[in-house]
Amino acid sequence: MKKIIITTPENIEVEYNLADIGSRTAAFVVDTLLQTAIMILLAIPITILCIIFKDLWTKYYGWVIGAAIILTTLITYGYYIFCEIKMNGRTFGKKLLKIRAIRNNGEPISIKHSAIRNLFKVIIDSIGIGIVLIFFTKQNKRIGDFAASTIVISENTKTKPSSLDNLSKIKENFEHYLTKDECELLREYYRRKDTLEDSLILRNCIKSYFYDKFNNLGVINEWQEFINELVK
């Protein structure tokens, strides 16, 4: 499995496993089947209208066809945008295959990034060009990923930080995500927490800070237990 090292806006280097072509293709198939099922459900009332209410169909068929085209566009294109924004870079297919789209700098994708990458998916990549590019590009990218500055990572294994200053008395699997100032803050808190009058307020502030930090990095689920135990 290919790996990539990303430097986040906080100058933290994090190593991710790139999603391979098998998992990305399987996720696309799942999403396509789901979209097809939705379109079949929407086609049922249109078919009933054509068969039972022929006069109504004859009178308004132009509106019905126009509405059907709009709904099809929303399903084939809007589905990806809606899911990726609501599920942090995932669609139902990606969630099932445990992969996720993120920005090149490791931050969660925005609606702009999702709209760009999926526009190319619907227009170009869905006909097979995207699969070819994933084979031959270093970061397993298709055209939409290049245009939107995104990558797709695997969540089957925990992301591994690349390098930062070593820490003592802090969990090993967390140490690489901390800056020097954050390390000093935690050490100072541990040293003085029993003598601080407002230790509860400070503890909640620290927990809130690190929750926001990991949520922005897109790894909040992986480190939730650590945050809960961070400053007991």
Image (spheres, rainbow, N blue to C red):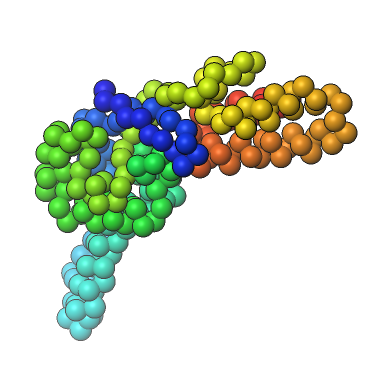
Q: Residue at x 16, y 43 (%)?
A: 130
- Give the quarter of the figure containing the N terminus: top left
Q: How many marks?
A: 0
Where is residue 198, by image quadrant? top right
- Give the quarter of the figure containing the C terminus: top right
* Direction from residue 123 to residue 231 in the image, left or right: right
Between 149 and 1, the residue placed more toward the observer is: 149
Q: Residue at x 19, y 79 (%)?
A: 62
* Direction from residue 60 to residue 182 in the image, left or right: right
Instruction: Answer yes or no: is residue 48 visible.
Output: no
Instruction: Answer yes or no: is residue 156 visible.
Output: yes
Q: Residue at x 28, y 64 (%)?
A: 71
Image coords of residue 67 (percent x, y):
26, 71
* Direction from residue 2 to residue 84 in the image, left or right: right
Relative to 110, residue 64 above or below: below
Relative to 38, residue 45 above or below: below
Between 94 and 230, the residue placed more toward the observer is: 230
Image coords of residue 194 (percent x, y):
84, 24
Between 19 and 70, the residue placed more toward the observer is: 19
Between 204 and 179, the residue placed more toward the observer is: 179
Image coords of residue 178 (percent x, y):
56, 29
Image coords of residue 222 (percent x, y):
51, 28
